[in-house]
Image (cartoon, rainbow, N blue to C red):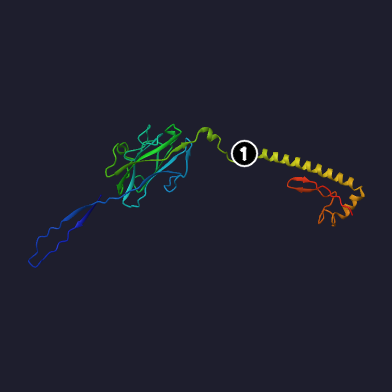
């Protein structure tokens, strides 16, 4: 609610003398109704514009970033995290609550840090190592939010106010919002996560695979050499036959040996390497 002050205009007639003029003020209270939309977000960093998309999984010692945002663009309103707590239940009033921020908006847990002003503008961000506080496989964050006009940041350095139990005056709304689920990475899952490629274990695995590949290549080369030797021995034996000598000179369908228009020409240099295997074409018998 805003308070506006209107000045009353006074007209003075001086033709009959100067009267005594009393200048007064009229206070008029103006109010308006509307819809304010706020949300509680899980963040990847202290930046309110960096929300987590998809499932959020944390190790025990990792920090959780939580942000609250008023979506209405207003320079006259501020959003206050009055209190926040963690629990294993998605329902804010069920389960054992573990206080994180207490009235009037100050951290009550040593691992809680405020990253963006609380009660200063339309957003606020804090972080907490939540799985060092609550021993559960998954947790939820619940916060009670308030709206104030202008500025309602708590003085958390003041002992009396930091330990207070009542909301700040001038704060309205008092709505509770809950986050989605935050899962904890189990220790065995953490151990099985991929290691850095520069680690000694990764280097030894790479060298082992390299040695295995080299061994396979040597075996293939040996088999290939054996087949080449066998083919050449067979070719030399066939050259004793006049018909094969003639084919070696003329080929099938003409040409000068190798692959020609008529087909394959037997000879000592004609094994064909295709797709990693040796393929020796079957000679064709040609009569003249």
For the residue carrying disc 1, how many other residues have a C-alpha within 10 Å: few (<14), some (14-19), or many (20+)?
some
| Most foreground residue, 45 or 288 | 288
Question: Is residue 109 or residue 44 the one in the foreground?
Answer: 44
Tell me the residue that label 1 is attached to. Answer: 202
* Image-based side of 120 in relation to 56, left or right: left
Q: Where 151 falls versus 211 (above or below)?
A: below
| Residue beneath the point at 62% across and 36% down | 201
User: Quadrant of residue 110 in the image?
Assistant: top left
The location of residue 22, given as percent across then percent down, is 12, 58
Q: How many marks?
A: 1
Residue most extreme to the left: 16
Position above or below: 17 against 60:
below
User: Residue 62 versus residue 97: which sits nearer the camera?
Assistant: 97
Identity of the residue drawn at 55% across and 34% down:
191
Q: Residue furthest front?
A: 287
Which element type, helix, strand or loop, lies under badge 1? Answer: helix
Residue 54 at least partly seen: yes
Question: In terms of image quadrants, where is residue 202?
Answer: top right
| Residue 24 at x, y percent in the picture | 15, 56
- Measuring from the top left, give residue 47's x and y in whole percent: 43, 47
- Can see residue 115? no
Quarter of the picture holding the C terminus: bottom right
Image quadrant in which you'd find residue 251? bottom right
Which residue appears at 21% of the width and 55% of the height? 5
| Residue 168 pos. (x, y %) | 29, 42
């Amino acid at each position: 609610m805003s308070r506006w002050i209107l000045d009353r205009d006074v007209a003075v007639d001086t033709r009959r003398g100067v009267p005594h003029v009393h200048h007064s003020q009229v206070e008029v209270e103006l109010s308006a109704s509307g819809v304010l939309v706020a949300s509680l977000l899980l963040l990847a960093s202290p930046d309110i514009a960096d929300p987590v998309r998809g499932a959020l999984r944390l190790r025990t010692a990792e920090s959780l970033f939580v942000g609250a945002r008023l979506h209405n663009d207003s320079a006259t309103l501020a959003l206050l995290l009055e209190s926040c707590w963690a629990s294993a239940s998605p329902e804010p009033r069920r389960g054992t609550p573990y206080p994180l921020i207490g009235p009037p908006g100050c951290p009550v847990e040593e691992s809680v840090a405020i990253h963006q002003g609380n009660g200063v503008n339309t957003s606020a961000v804090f972080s907490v190592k939540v799985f060092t506080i609550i021993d559960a496989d998954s947790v939820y964050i619940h916060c009670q939010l308030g709206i104030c006009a202008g500025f309602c940041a708590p003085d958390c350095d003041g002992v009396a106010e930091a330990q207070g139990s009542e909301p700040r005056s001038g704060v309205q709304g008092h709505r509770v919002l809950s986050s989605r689920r935050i899962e904890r990475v189990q220790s065995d899952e953490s151990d099985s996560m991929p290691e850095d490629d520069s680690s000694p274990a990764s280097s030894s695995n790479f060298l082992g695979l390299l040695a295995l590949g080299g061994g396979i290549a040597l075996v293939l080369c040996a088999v290939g050499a054996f087949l080449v030797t066998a083919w050449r021995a067979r070719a030399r034996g066939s050259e004793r036959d006049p018909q094969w000598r003639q084919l070696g000179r003329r080929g099938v369908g003409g040409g000068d040996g190798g692959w020609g228009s008529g087909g394959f020409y037997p000879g000592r240099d004609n094994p064909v390497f295709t797709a990693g295997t040796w393929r020796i074409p079957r000679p064709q018998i040609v009569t003249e």
